Image (cartoon, helix red, strand yellow):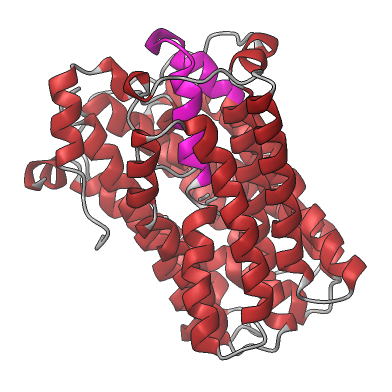
Amino acid sequence: MTSILKSFMALYAAVLILAMGLGLLATFLSVKLTLQGFSTQVTGLILTAYFMGSVVGAFYCRHLIQRIGHIRSFSAFAVLATAMVMLHAATDSALAWALLRFFTGLSTIGLFMVIESWLNEGASPQTRGRVFSLYMVIYYLGSSGGQQLLNFGNVTGQTLFFVVGLLLLSCMIPVALTRVRHVSLPDVAPMGLKHIIKRAPLGLIGCFTAGLISSAFYTMGPVFCQKMNLSVAQLSSFMTITVLGGLVFQWPVGSISDRFDRSIVIPLLGVLFAIVSFVMILAAQNSFGFFMAIASLFGGLMFSIYPVAVARTHDMFEPKDVVTVSSALLLFQGIGSVIGPMASAAVIESLDSPQGFFVYFLIISVVSAGICFFLRQKEIAQIIPVEDQGDFMVMNHISPVALQIDLRREDPETVVENLSHQPGPAHHHPGQGHI
């Protein structure tokens, strides 16, 4: 592990700083929009633009990266993202903020594509699993740490925009000082979407569900806290604990998904998430400490759906098909991410209660689990023997490159070695969900 840290220290440092900036930005914007008197529905529409930009960027940023190289592309994306953040402070127009969020999402996905393709190219087959697991751990830590930065500025002022801008510019420093040869992004083959849907419906439903819930959490979570009259410190604690819960739970959930049929693990995760979402409604009326304890479980289940769905989809295809299948996963997750903020905002407004936030999660998880159980019962979803399943990898939906990592391409002995060296829970797009 020490050698991996040494080899990729610059990239890991850039990820940590970048994730802190984006984590702070997402929460701060939600709070800012609420304080400025925008309705929940308008807030959802504005923040949805980020995910639209991410989807567009995922398919088009690769051309720029391939043409001018990784370091210059990273610098260009970082400067664009910084400019978009700074411009938020210059206007209160809802339309302008939506446009700024769109280009922030586009530039952000470009940044993560650079980092992930760099890691993919630089890691050997023997270390790739550990390299990406550590990368995801650092991203989760940075994202959760960014939530705490909300306490270091006045949310009614503009200072935090400059803090985010400083972080986005600072992430360029370790990358700019790195000496590395030009690396290539994996080629994306045309995808036969109809074939992929027929072959792996559970995985695609899981990715779509993950997009629906994670984007809703990052955009409407701070809105819920504001409507519940929580303090800024309590709001940042809720966001932090939920994200960290998502990190810690990936190891036990991953272990379970490696030992049992994933076609049953995915809907069971949905059932458990529905139960916890209901408990969150009750917990919000109790002590803040109890609410935080349940929030960690809520985040753990929410952020575990995506990697299990990705692993299930990879189980259904040969390693040579990973790049093609990843495009479909990205598409379904992206569509869910675009719908999530608007749909959750609509539920909150229709119920005229902040508890509509968790009612939304309850509805989505019940419907998703029901569809998955139905497909499995009707034998539309193929059951794969446990011994033939691929290995679970700690993951979040950041860029399409990470989706293209399939440990089945390694030798069996290497896979066992990688799993035995996975970092422990002591160490979260965006979590798309990153934000």
Membership of 313 in magenta stretch: yes
Query: At 65% across and 57% down in the image, what residue appears?
Result: 274
Q: Is residue 42 shown above or below 63?
A: below
Q: Nearer the viewer, residue 14 or 1?
A: 1
* The magenta stretch spans residue 241: no
Q: Residue at image x 62%, y 40%?
A: 54
> Residue farthest to the left?
3
Q: Describe residue 174's horizontal placement relative to residue 331 as left or right.
A: left
Residues drawn in magenta: 305-328
Frontmost residue, 156 versus 254: 254
Quarter of the image where the C terminus is located? bottom right
Number of marks in picture = 0
In the rendered image of this protein, does residue 354 appear above or below residue 310? below
Residue at 51%, 68% (x, y): give it.
Answer: 24
254 to the left or right of 29: left
Picture residue at 46% right of the left edge, 39% below the top: 307
Where the N terminus falls, by quadrant?
Answer: top left
Name of the residue lying farthest toward the right: 350
Task: Please state the horizontal and vertical placement of residue 392, each as a whole percent of the image.
Answer: 35, 35
- Asked if residue 400 shows in the view, the reply is no
**Image height check: is 186 above or below 371?**
above
**Any part of residue 329 in sight:** yes
